[in-house]
Amino acid sequence: MNRYNLAKKYQEPEENIMMDIGALAKSQEELIDLSIGDPDLITDERIIEQAAQDAKAGHTRYTASDGSAAFIQTVIDHYKSRYDLDFAAKQVRATIGAMHGMYLTLLAITDPGDEIIIHEPYFSPYKDQIELAGGIPVVIPTYEKDGFQLEADILEQAISKKTKAVVINSPNNPTGAVFSEETFQKIADIAIQHDLFILSDEIYEELAFDHSFTPMAKFAPENTITFSGFSKSFAMTGWRIGYMIAPAYVSEIAKLINESITYSAPSISQQAGIYALQHADELIPEVVNVFKARLAYVKKRVDEIDFLHLGKVQGTMYAFINIADTHLDSAAFTKKLLDETQVLVVPGKAFGVTTGDQHVRLAVTQEIAMLKEAFDRIEQMKF
């Protein structure tokens, strides 16, 4: 038996940039890893303690496949109090992280050959999930000069008779851009006009620094499928708990599909999520303030280095740094950076080549003392 016993599409696997740089990093001593969006923060002790108490009280069994009634109601209450949005229980389901919900949705809505639009730079699993679901990813650019806002005319031109949906992500990974309400409204108008789904990844919703976040569902409630969770805003990456909110007919099919895959999200993690959302006003600012301070520090240091550039920091935990003045592409820069400074970032081409390859993504997943050490090393580089 060998690799040629695998499915044909996996016999010659495509380049995986994230895996490649990870392998390079293993050989580095004194590594400062600023690549993956898994921060050094520990989940708040109050969440951990409540989840432990709930486990001891018996919350260790399967819940209903779409989540416990308490979890679903807590999500509904959260959206009502925070955004004045009303959802029914049949629209909400617990997922094993936000991307689980995205994949279930793509499986539910995609026929072979359907086109799904994604805006570049994009979180790389979007493209992979679309292809796994039998769809065709159609990539459209956003540009640094426009603050990485999605331009309506570019979106309109990408729509064909085969288009089924558009995937949006704001606040955005990797750019940190936060779409304006004007951008959201234009996307909504186009989706409504062409009868398209909007798959809105809002996992960084609480990490919009300059203004309050407005969910896409405010603009196109009948078209929007929302994905969010607890990993980023509550420092709960390892708990693997999220949720999706969709029209009931989509949620029903997602439930049907998932009953043959994972059945339900972890009951203990759902209990942790309930506590987190019920105490969001206390818990979220502590996390947000950490990332905001770290990104402000990164912005200050980048502005002092003549071969790096960074626009206005708007949100998330990422800095999408322009490296054009080094005259290297993102992969070559990342390798040089790792070899010479032992600092690991992600090359922008991992997020698309049209507008990504003159950038690298730096995640502020280490404390400021480590960021200082990283930039002390970086500023010594020569080009």
Image (spheres, rainbow, N blue to C red):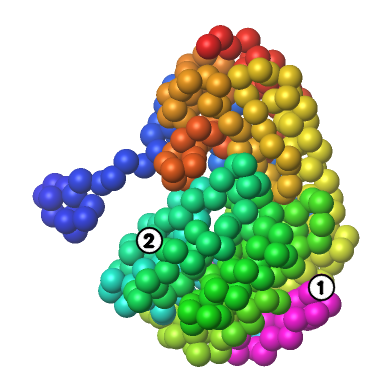
Residue range (magenta): 71-96
* Residue drawn 41% across the image and 75% down it: 164
Q: In the image, residue 132 lies at what x, y percent?
A: 33, 64
**Looking at the image, residue 64 lies above or below residue 32:** below
Q: Nearer the viewer, residue 295 or 231?
A: 295
Q: Residue furthest right?
A: 282
**Disc number placed over residue 137 in the picture, else none:** 2
Q: In the image, residue 380 lies at what x, y percent?
A: 63, 10
Residue 92 highlighted magenta (yes or no): yes
* Residue drawn 40% across the image and 38% down it: 17
Residue 359 makes an appearance in the image: yes
Label 1, residues with CA under 10 Å away: few <14, some 14-19, many ≥20: few
2 or 1: mark nearer the eye:
2
Q: Nearer the viewer, residue 372 or 169?
A: 169
Residue 190 highlighted magenta (yes or no): no
Is 358 positioned to the left or the right of 147 in the image?
A: left
Q: Nearer the viewer, residue 25 or 312?
A: 312
* Residue drawn 74% across the image and 53% down it: 207
Pointer 1 residue? 82
**What is the C-alpha distance between the residues marked 2 and 1?**
33 Å
Q: Secondary structure at mark 1?
A: helix
Q: Nearer the viewer, residue 161 or 51?
A: 161
Is 208 positioned to the left or the right of 236 in the image?
A: right
Residue type at tag 1: Arg
* Quarter-of-image position of residue 261: bottom left
Residue type at tag 2: Pro
Most frequent secondary structure within the magenta stretch: helix
